[in-house]
Amino acid sequence: MPLTVSVVELADLVTRVLLRHGVSAENAGPVAETIVAAERDGAASHGLLRLPGYVSTLKSGWVDGRAVPIVTDAAPGLVATEAANGFAQPALRASALLLREKARSQGIAALAIRNSHHFAALWPDIEPFAVEEFIVLAMVNGRQRMAVWGGNRKLFGTSPMAFACPRPGRLPLVWDQASSVMAQGEILLAAQRGQMLPEGVGLDAEGRPTTNPQAVLDGGSILPFGGHKGSSIAFMIEIIAGALTGGPFGFEDRSHEYPGAQTPKAGQTVILIDPLLVPGNRYFERIEGLFGAVVASGVERLPAERRYTRRQQSLRDGITIGDRDLATLQELLA
Amino acid sequence: MPLTVSVVELADLVTRVLLRHGVSAENAGPVAETIVAAERDGAASHGLLRLPGYVSTLKSGWVDGRAVPIVTDAAPGLVATEAANGFAQPALRASALLLREKARSQGIAALAIRNSHHFAALWPDIEPFAVEEFIVLAMVNGRQRMAVWGGNRKLFGTSPMAFACPRPGRLPLVWDQASSVMAQGEILLAAQRGQMLPEGVGLDAEGRPTTNPQAVLDGGSILPFGGHKGSSIAFMIEIIAGALTGGPFGFEDRSHEYPGAQTPKAGQTVILIDPLLVPGNRYFERIEGLFGAVVASGVERLPAERRYTRRQQSLRDGITIGDRDLATLQELLA
């Protein structure tokens, strides 16, 4: 029978699962928070569904659940954080105060996290900064799954990028998207259901276009969105999240040496800009005019609005955990 | 008969055209430089082909060829420049030294230019910073030509974005791309030739999908590349280049009030990051490994390589100006 719990109760449950599998209390909190935030906002692909992957990766020894991030004040506008093979979220949390202070005083600041495992949605990382009136840009690289445009094998991760900006008196605009034309999870689902993929989604192990999802999964590669232009975006992400931070590149992945490992060990960069420090831009007076024009042009929903609606429902009515997720939770807590 | 000139001679010719049409000496140099750089590198769409557009815009009064940019040291990491309705390139040149100094000492810095006319390729703006070993990201917004994904009318410009990063002992990796699925120039060309467009390129004035290039030009709109994902990128560009700088949004365009005006009056943001200031990333030791892996995966050419090859030819053999461009040059100089 499905169970309805509050956000606070779910955070407690997920935290207990992580603690049960060796994650330190300092790390369990921030990781649980992104899982719960996704479940709360109806982003099921990054919610409870991911919990078994976290646990099997912890068991494999690929990620260190007790890692202690080391935050370095690298320059007036730069924070460099060694995640020490731990999850990305505790590294971000350990760095956030310094990053925020720098951006507020310098106008712009960047956080470069390396050797971090990011297995969550990216929007929960950046939304809080936009609530604090920063413009935010974040990029994460990951283990190889995607070909470069014109290439014949996987090389980059699915390369998510997220952007957020503040709105006066409203929750921020936030978007978060992979640079692949389709998510790895969608390809897995198609394979399980015996469905074929659309054209232009993947290559097989020999680098030939295929619509067979199993061929993509068996040593093939996903293609970037939008052809060479999406590939350029992913290339930038590999450089800003990988080369700049010092995190492993997608093609340097070693997770296959740890059976059960599902998280990418890579890097993450977060850039904050304070729009109030640009003289004369009248940011907060003008920005709603832009959103108004977008809506007037026939766009039904701004990015993140669906999640915000779902969030209100969850906070009011609780989050219903289906039988399958409930069984998983009980199993992972046993 | 075609004429072959050196890069230096061509810069002289183009500068004289701009001076002849009222551009100040301070502004003519930087504008001529991007036109010549494009012609030199085989990027004809942004080379001499654009010169009549510059001149007709100057004649219309829409742009001020004698504008004096005002550079403000807005914060330790921020330069804010009022282009005063002039071209973007002189504003960038006036700001470059301060921007560079800030990025070198702060680790990251941004330049926000507003009320600027950017009618050129974007890569000539950023390549020099990457030669100086900065990672560079630039965005320009522009007058409305493109619909938001899900929208029925034009709202954003074609929203170019460019990225560059340094390579040890080599010219930088540079890419520069519009966020539209096709360039405005390509649609004009199709209309002139009576060719139809592929599916998914444009909407007509009623917001309906069309393959008729004239319908796109007559009050219709171009679509973003890669569906909603490219649209998200363009949305970010409108905010970072428009809202952050204080430059006009695409939908605030007033160029139609100035017959002959062809340039967009908008904003531009350039972000520099110094990769040497992130401790332990070994950027210059690792970056060639990434490029090597990309090439080994079957990618024939890294972004910008074709331009670099063409540049070497131009510097060695000169630039050949065809009869048509030659006639235009003579006419504009008369």
Image (cartoon, coloured by chain):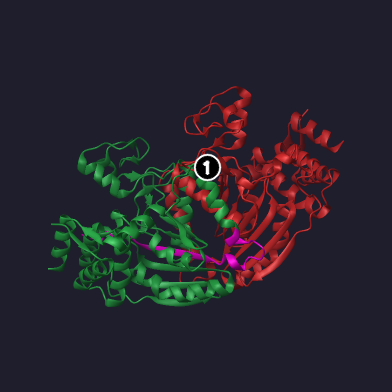
Chain colours: A green, B red
Residue ID for mark 1: A297
Q: Position of residue A150 (x, y in %)?
A: 44, 41
Residue B46 x %, y %: 67, 41
Query: What residue type is disc 1 on?
Result: Ser
Q: Is residue B134 visible?
A: no
Picture coordinates of residue B215, whole percent (x, y):
57, 28
Q: Quarter of the image holding residue A4?
A: bottom left
State the extent of the magenta-drawn residues as a range: A257-285
Position above or below: A259 against B209: below
Q: Secondary structure at mark 1?
A: loop
Q: How many marks?
A: 1
> Which chain is home to disc 1?
A
Identify which residue, A6 or B19, lies in the foreground.
Answer: A6
Which residue is at the far front? A316
Q: Is residue B329 visible?
A: yes
Quarter of the image where one finds residue B76: bottom right
